[in-house]
Every structure is written in C-alpha cells, then in structure tokens.
Image (tube, grey):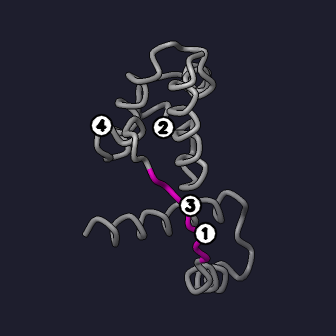
Amino acid sequence: MASNQKIILDRINLYLDGEGFKKERLAKRLGKSPSAFYANLSGKNQKVAQFAVELAEVLGLPPSFFIEEDFQYKAEQTVQIGLMSSIAAFSAGELSEEGRQGLEQIGRICDLVNIYS
C-alpha cells in the first residue's frame, strides 16, 4: 500500500475511533457489508481515496476531509455526567451496556448538532 493511502486510512480510523462511530452502522449507511467496510479500513481495497470521499459524504463532512494535506483532528473526550446521571436515575440505576452505548451516541449527536448549528 502506498504511504499516501496509509495516511488517509490512519486519518479515517483516528476520526472514527475518536468520534465513537459504530463501524457496522457506517457500513450499512454506505451500502457495504461489515466485512467489506473493514477491508476498506485496513487497506485491502485499493480504492482508498474513493472510500474516503464516500465515507466523508455519509458523515456529512466535505468530500476531501480525509484527503486534505492540512487534515487536523483531535478527539475530544467529553463526559456526559449530567445526562448519564439523569438516565441512570430514570432507569433505577440499571442501564444496560447497550443502553449506555446508545446514550453515548445521543450525547455525540447533541455535540454535533451544537457544532453545526
């Protein structure tokens, strides 16, 4: 794999991991199977730039987001303490792992709405 392709894939993985996106959901949104999506992420598919553009568009980012030379991304760890406490109280403190993950996704969506509003 060319080093440029590796850089793009590293950026994609950094962004997806930092934002906490579920890769299986993204695969579905792209119309790919999870195994095909993971193959793209690992560089087994040689069309890295095309994948980067398609993924950026699905995420609502500029098509060249992962490809730009001045790419900059730093994951921000946000703790949704107030929201988590409220939900935990509502659920009598018995929030399932799936429920906790869903709550974290809602928090990320709220953050994105605040950023793009």
In the rendered image, residue 111 lying in the magenta stretch gets the answer: no
Residue assigned mark 3 = 75
Q: Nearer the viewer, mark 2 or mark 4?
A: 4
Question: In the drawing, does residue 49 fall left or right of residue 98?
Answer: left
Which numbered tag is attached to residue 26? 2
Residue assigned mark 1 = 77
Mark 1 is on which residue type? Gln
Specify which label sits upstream in the sequence, 4 or 1.
4
Q: Kindly give the residue lying farthest to the left in the view shown.
A: 117
Magenta stretch, residue numbers: 72-79
**Image spot of residue 80 (x, y percent):** 58, 78
- Work out which quarter of the rendered image holds the C terminus and state it: bottom left
Along the line of sight, which residue is nearer the eye, 101 or 114? 114
Q: CB under 8 Å between callouts 3 and 1?
A: yes
Secondary structure at numbered mark 3: loop
Mark 3 is on which residue type? Ala
